Image (cartoon, coloured by chain):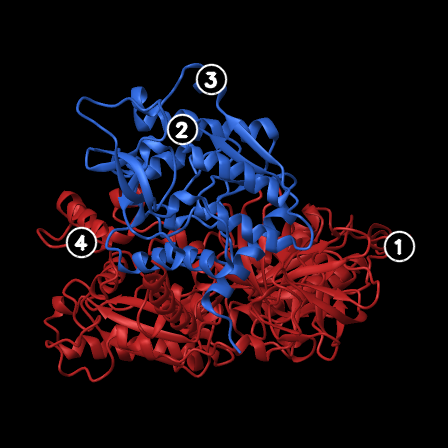
Chain colours: A blue, B red
Amino acid sequence: MALTYLQRLEAESIHIIREVVAETDNPVMLYSIGKDSAVMLHLAIKAFFPARPPFPLLHVDTTWKFRDMYAFRDRRAAEVGMKLIVHVNPEGLAMNINPFTHGSAVHTDVMKTQGLRQALDKYGFDAAFGGARRDEEKSRAKERIFSFRSAQHRWDPKTQRPELWKLSNWTELDVWQYIYLQDIPIVPLYFARERPVVERDGTLIMVDDERMPLRDGEVPVLRKVRFRTLGCYPLTGAIESNADTLPAIVQEMLLAKTSERQGRVIDYDAAGSMEKKKVEGYF
Amino acid sequence: MARAFAPVAAEIDHYLATHQRKSLLRFITCGSVDDGKSTLIGRLLYESKLLFEDQLAALEADSRKMGTQGDGLDFALLLDGLTAEREQGITIDVAYRYFATDRRKYIVADTPGHEQYTRNMVTGASTADVAVLIVDARKGALTQTRRHSYLVSLLGIRKILVAVNKMDLVEYAEAPFRAITAEYGDFAARIGLDDVTFIPVSALKGDNVVAKSAHMPWHRGPTLMGYLESVAIDEERLQKAPFRLPVQWVNRPHHDFRGFAGTIASGTIHTGERVRVQPSGRESTIARIVTADGDLAQAIAGQSITLTLTDEIDISRGDLISTASAPPEVADQFEATIIWMADEPMLPGRPYLLKIGARTVNAQIGDLKYKVNVNSLEHVAAKTLALNEIGVCNLSLDHPVAFDVYKDNRDTGAFIFIDRVSNNTVGAGLLEFALRRAHNIHIQALDLNKGVRAQLKGQKSCVLWLTGLSGAGKSTIANLVEKKLHALGRHTYLLDGDNIRHGLNKDLGFTDVDRVENIRRVAEVAKLMVDAGLIVITAFISPFRAERRMARELMDAAEFIEIFVDTPLAMAEQRDSKGLYKKARQGELKNFTGIDSPYEVPEHAEIHVETTRLAADAAADLIVRELGRRGVIGTVV
């Protein structure tokens, strides 16, 4: 008898989640509503079954997520009966920081990176785990599955605490297979449907609410699209797709010729941009 | 839509099922800086058609901007993800890459070649099945490669693939390849690696990476990919070992449920099976194996489960639940091999946190027996370990822990050291065996002390520690000193190298380790005699400063008088009273001080005797006079 690959991944992740919780005083799970978070939450529930996971969920909100994401987040937290903390950087909110006037770099820095630091300080969390996968981006491949950060919340690539004897390794395909096999609830935006989009700088952006300023000549049109990755809607590119079921998504994955981060506007800021953000504390 | 959906689902299910049944091979790549590791993995991914279009486009752009291959693709850029290391041209940290073929899934840990990052190699090596060592065909195996090989062997990886890279730079000639095969093969055998395969490759040009090279028809073995696809992995190895579950978490949602959660480190478990909980030794029977997907009748190594027992026994995080018929050992003192991973050196005597499985205890590192020179594999006397150094020492824990020796179980036999202040992992270790002595021996406080005893003899007790090369005249001088002191009515005892080695230390040889132990025992005996009020004279080569310092530190400040019997090697060899130098020169005596084992000259000896200027009798007089001056032998002179 041998465990399948996914069974091993699952067991390794459960092990690490239990370990972090046992070794720290006040851990928190960073919940970003996307599919990786969905898998992480599912694993946490499994790790402590039949008890409930002994930590809260933290969503560092930018106020620019898709409406479907907010609805899903609140529903899911209620279903699993875990405490959900939502933190929005109050200064960023007061300054009306947004991706349109301030650009993706400033928006992400203020609302996500600084917002995360504020939340960790405010609640005194001494460990935070999130669902960043190793295959997503070159720099992320080098993080242990749980990132240990210094008291100033900076991630130092040269002094990572070595996590000996255990590794965890989820790829995008693993995540989709696991969601499919375990029937894990995910945000409907991952499934193809007709949605109002505009094509901007070669990327399909969904017009999710009235805050989106349209440029001259831009008219939202209905196209059958879905998202491979979810973030702030003005910064998240959609792909044209007919994949409206999980098997179809997996099939599309298998045929894909581009990696998923291409849909994220954030990566194109500058060379090594993800690494810079990570040194500053962005997860 | 429904009709179109059904075949897709069936097809995908079939695909996923096949995908899930593939075997998994974890391998690690290591080698020196510039040997071309990252290029090799990049090439492997590229040739296996495992790159996405945008990754390829980014690679092309990066290659143009900062590549080192002219117009060609610089595969190293694919892996060297961090800006810092790109700029320095070295790989900093372990990067994991996954790929799959029709046959297998692979997880590659690409580990750093740069010396200061050896610790990360250990991270990558601890779960690997195979190590791929990359060697530059022009340079052969360098120190770093040997260090990595030694680590690989220590950590229990048995299958080694040596990729002799950059064959294009030696005109694809067989001779340099054979030379490396012979030389490294010899080294590998000495460190216990016996499953070694050599493949000549060019990562840059793609020879023997995936496709067989047309340039090297003389190579009849597999390609790199061919090897990885076919190498045997024993996926059920862990299941065959006795059952071990380190308890991570006690799960108590309500009063009616008390579960013990953990990942099965080895073996299998069934409901109804008898288990023993270590270190308490209590036994019970498995009631349920609980998972969120429903209860199981049986669970195997690698699964994360929650157990309930039929009896209410006290179990907490860190305990080890094991099969009752083959429980792990319990001990609080060990001999262990340590790999030091911190910039600050390891300090014997300083308390560190030691984490084994889910248990964390305080640990004190006792005497470091030796460290290993990874090039020569020699055991070198040492007091401390610096970054990346490997040594063997005794450990003393403040609580007993359950364990297996590392060679039997990589999980329950390995531990990490954590700095108590910074919370950083500063070292890793492998348990070799438990020490059963010294269990309940506490130092007895006595009413009579050495001062009182020495006073009765009209002297101050002390050690005259004579050190010098073999044949320097230590024994002769020591004898004369003892006679002179005896004539003065002093109470003495002479511990002579040869005499001790025929009795107390007859189990010891002349390796560095044994030399250190020899001196440790002599120092301890001398200490007891000093406590008895005697003037102790020792005549041992005692070649290492560290051990002389150890002896010195055992005594009180003025009690240790180091006497350097200084005879040049040439003169000692010429004298050769016991014929030992001749034997050593002919290779019949190994580890002979001055010939193939070092003598570390004392830096601050209390008395320096130059035998080129003083005859033995005059030297003895000089020593006795100095004792008088120091007030050791009272008023009688």
Choose the circle earlier in sequence order: 3 or 2: 2
Question: Marks 4 and 1: which is nearer the front?
Answer: 4
At label 4, the amino acid type is: Asp
Instruction: Give the number of the disc on residue A64.
Output: 2
Question: Marks 1 and 2: which is nearer the front?
Answer: 2
- Mark 3 vs mark 2, CA separation in Å: 15 Å
- Mark 4 vs mark 1, CA separation in Å: 73 Å
Q: Are marks 1 and 2 in contact (CB under 8 Å)?
A: no
Q: Is residue B111 visible?
A: no
Number of marks in picture: 4
Q: Do the residues at discs 4 and 1 belong to one chain?
A: yes
Residue designated by label 1: B446
Camera-side residue: B112 or B300? B300
Q: Residue furthest top?
A: A94
- Decide: few, some or many residues near mark 1? Use Cα within 10 Å; few <14, some 14-19, many ≥20: few
Q: Does residue B384 lie above or below B504 as drawn?
A: above
Question: Marks 3 and 2: which is nearer the front?
Answer: 2
Residue designated by label 4: B74
At label 2, the amino acid type is: Trp
x, y percent for residue B260 = 71, 60
Disc 4: host chain: B
Q: Secondary structure at mark 1?
A: loop
Residue designated by label 3: A91
Disc 1: host chain: B
Question: Marks 2 and 4: which is nearer the front?
Answer: 2
Q: Does residue B491 lie above or below A239 as drawn?
A: below
x, y percent for residue A120 = 55, 31
Q: Secondary structure at mark 4?
A: loop
- Decide: few, some or many residues near mark 4? Use Cα within 10 Å; few <14, some 14-19, many ≥20: many
x, y percent for residue B295 = 67, 67
Q: Residue at x 17, y 44 (%)?
A: B66
Disc 3: host chain: A
